[in-house]
Amino acid sequence: MATTEHSVGFEPADRLAQDRESVRRRFWIKFKKVVARLPFAEDLLAAYYCAFDRQTPRHVQAALLGAIAYFILPFDFIPDMLPVLGFTDDAAVLATAIRMVASHITPEHREAARAALKRGVPMEE
């Protein structure tokens, strides 16, 4: 019987790294296009900074990356191009993830989000 390098239900480390980089790249592309229409932009950025913070526990990163991935998906439950309603599902998914891991989103993550929005051009890391 062949053995694998990972436990059942977990991606190999190299696959996870590729997925994280894909999320990072796609996040900034979409964020820059829609930031002016996002009432939850600061929360989204704080979640992003927390998800990519090396000090953040893996389970927290996974929850936040899932919410961020939902945000960047081109097709979701309510299409983002719909006026007013377009981002309500994205906001609900993000709010749920943030509630689950709120204690891990630090004042530093929130300050980085505010500073990035104030600059007008989010800092890509």
Image (cartoon, rainbow, N blue to C red):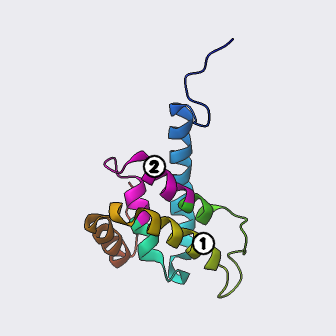
The residue lying toward the viewer, choosing from 96 and 15, is 96
Tell me what residue is drawn at x 55 percent, y 22 percent.
Answer: 5
Horizontally, residue 23 falls left or right of residue 53, namely right
Sort mark 1 into few (<14), some (14-19) or many (20+) by Cα contacts within 10 Å. Answer: many
Placement of the N terminus among the 4 image quadrants: top right
Tell me what residue is drawn at x 56 percent, y 72 percent.
Answer: 33
On residue 16, the disc is none
Q: Position of residue 72 (x, y in %)?
A: 61, 62
Q: Earlier in the sequence, mark 2 or mark 1?
A: 2
Query: Is 26 above or below relative to 92?
Result: above
Three-letter code for the amino acid on which mark 1 is drawn: Asp
Tell me how far mark 2 sits from mark 1, CA to CA.
20 Å
State the residue position of label 2. 59
Tell me what residue is drawn at x 31 percent, y 48 percent.
Answer: 55
Q: Secondary structure at mark 2?
A: helix
Q: Which residues are magenta?
A: 47-66
State the residue position of label 1. 90
Query: In the rendered image, is residue 78 in sight?
Result: yes
Sort mark 2 into few (<14), some (14-19) or many (20+) by Cα contacts within 10 Å. Answer: few
Horizontally, residue 120 falls left or right of residue 62, namely left
Task: Please identify the residue farthest to the bottom as the structure is shown.
Answer: 84
Three-letter code for the amino acid on which mark 2 is drawn: His
- Nearer to us: label 2 or label 1: 2
Q: Position of residue 75 (x, y in %)?
A: 73, 65
Q: Position of residue 97 (x, y in %)?
A: 50, 65
Tell me what residue is drawn at x 67 percent, y 80 percent.
Answer: 86
Q: Secondary structure at mark 1?
A: helix
Name which quarter of the figure residue 46 lies in: bottom left
